[in-house]
Image: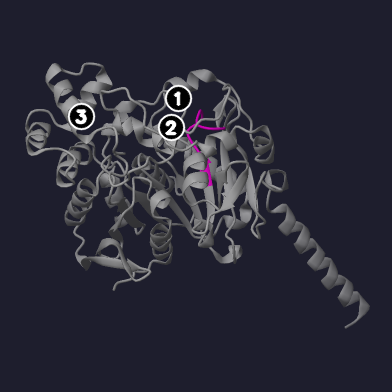
Amino acid sequence: MGLKQWIIIVSALFCTTILTAKSVPQADKIISLPGQPQASFQQYAGYITIDEKQQRALFYYFVEAATEAASKPLVLWLNGGPGCSSIGAGAFCEHGPFKPSGDTLLRNEYSWNKEANMLYLESPAGVGFSYSANKSFYGSINDAIAARDNLAFLEGWYEKFTEYKNREFFITGESYAGHYVPQLAQLIIQSNMKFNLKGIAIGNPLLEFNTDFNSRAEFLWSHGLISDSTYDIFTRVCNYSQIRRQYASGSLTAVCSQVISQVSREISRFVDTYDVTLDVCLPSVLLQSKMLSQLQDKEEIDVCVEDETTKYLNRKDVQKALHAQLIGVTSWTVCSEVLKYDMQNLEIPTIHVLGKLAKSGIRVLVYSGDQDSVLPLTGTRTLVNGLAKEIGLNTTVPYRTWVEGRQAAGWTQVYGDILSFATIRGASHEAPLSQPRRSLALFNAFLGGKPLPGA
């Protein structure tokens, strides 16, 4: 090889290296989080401005896959609420690489970044570190605004992380993300955005107001938490969807007030409705679903462990490492204290959006932690089964157990190889928090388009 050829090759390699280095935002790169164990993967955090005029910006935390990041898919995770943090709940309490414990971070053995590049978003503005300089924005947030801003975020994020533009992309979430996730996916398709969207997965989601909320009575009764007579009045005299509507309008009738008081008394304050099998409470991250629970009694969820995540994310050194700011609020909270979400949006059914996505070729997985009474599997399974019939999908995998670690990990049914339902045995409303190993196995199968393992 001549000297001239060698110089050309070296110059080309040098230019390629520079371009690669510039393809990720070095300003957003996290050097190391306080108390973090050594890690082989890269982390990024920062803001994407989605409205320059109103100075509105959404905060993200991005964790590259632990191995072979260049070949693994990109997954966006959205928590629910509405108005709760995907970083505080999803990343630091459920399936991120680390979990706070005192002054340190512990490694999460079942982190989802073992299988994907994970992107956590605090949305809408007013949640966590995300903000709007125009405070009037916080007074009128709804599903349409959230979906629009999430789409704008993705556009801006892809401009920063250009190497992910053609990567397989999945949107995941739980609880009120039963609205956020399908609505964002539908908007991506309608907008003809080239995001290479392959599928969505939603856990214990709110999909249809009446079916989801009214399945609570049967679930509580079948688990022995309420009596036969209370089950009768909770279905015949005043059901939970009625109570929820009345509560939202501030006009709870005496009859419905009596019913919910009786239900609450029988369940007792010693049971966590987000996981009815627990004899100790889960961390206060469960506040992310409190708006969906809202019983008449004003008692807070009984938290029996210190909220390590809130403490950690309120540390100044942590905020500096994350390139985060508190704008217009005095502290970081799991669920927004400034956001006024239009709670009428809870009644917008999203189950039919799942049908449209499936018809367009987007894989849809709906899963349920089977110990959750807030949004029970019974309502979810009914909705998914009804949707399959409505759009003409035949069952391709009959209802059966799926296995992980030689144990029954849950049950599953597949319709037409595009729509799937699964339960995670022994899991709470936030399934990865209570059953991390089984949740990771479910996640892995979903990304690969593989059936869940049988016996």
State whether the magenta stretch is mostly helix, strand or loop. loop
Query: Which residue in the protein does label 1 denote?
Result: 339
Image location of residue 198, percent across then percent down: 42, 58
Question: Quadrant of the rendered structure where residue 14 is?
Answer: bottom right
Give the Cα separation between the discs numbered 2 and 3: 29 Å
Secondary structure under badge 1?
loop
Q: Are marks 2 and 3 in contact (CB under 8 Å)?
A: no
Question: Is residue 194 visible in this depiction of the protein?
Answer: no
8 with respect to 261 (left or right)? right
Query: Which residue in the protein does label 3 denote?
Result: 265
Give the Cα separation between the discs numbered 1 and 2: 7 Å
Query: Which residue in the protein does label 2 denote?
Result: 83
Q: Of the residues shown, which amino acid type is indicated by label 3?
A: Arg
- In the image, is residue 314 part of the stretch drawn in magenta? no
410 with respect to 395 (left or right)? right
* 86 up-or-down from 347: above or below: below
Q: Which residues are magenta?
A: 120-129
